[in-house]
Amino acid sequence: MVNIQPVVFPIVGTATKLSVIVLGFPTSAKDCGIYYALLTDENVKIIEGNYQLTEQEFAAWGIDNSYIDDIVASHLNVVIVPESMDDDAVHNGGGGVQSATLGAPNLD
């Protein structure tokens, strides 16, 4: 799970975390599925979905699993906050808050 710049979903809440789980795949696989969820500070699920890595993304994966977080964050149009930023910086000027109506995550 990684911290993201806050994304406001009116009525529902504010997502501040991205959870990513790579789904099982055979050793002969050329791609794989990923489950993701945007969560609040209290780990309440705001949205969830699936993403399918392309063959090119899968081949480029290597040994750094943060690559998968980056791919999903890019797909959702959210920004991962570096671990070195403290919670105060994330919530008070760590790059701004996205609105769920303008600059919203890509949920396709």
Image (tube, rainbow, N blue to C red):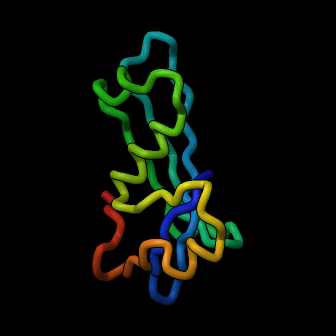
Q: Position of residue 47 (x, y in %)?
A: 50, 66
Determine which quarter of the picture holds residue 107: bottom left
Seen in the picture, residue 56 relative to 53 is either above or below; the reply is above
Count of numbered circles on the image: 0
Seen in the picture, residue 84 relative to 100 is either above or below; the reply is above
Seen in the picture, residue 35 relative to 31 is either above or below; the reply is below
Q: Position of residue 31 (x, y in %)?
A: 38, 25
Kindly give the residue lying farthest to the right in the view shown: 42
Determine which quarter of the picture holds residue 37: bottom right
Kindly give the residue lying farthest to the bottom in the view shown: 11
**Which residue occupies 46% across, 21% down?**
62
Horizontal side, residue 62 vs residue 40: left or right: left
Q: Position of residue 51 (x, y in %)?
A: 40, 44
**Which residue occupies 61% across, 72% down?**
40
Horizontal side, residue 58 vs residue 80: left or right: left
Q: Position of residue 5 (x, y in %)?
A: 48, 68
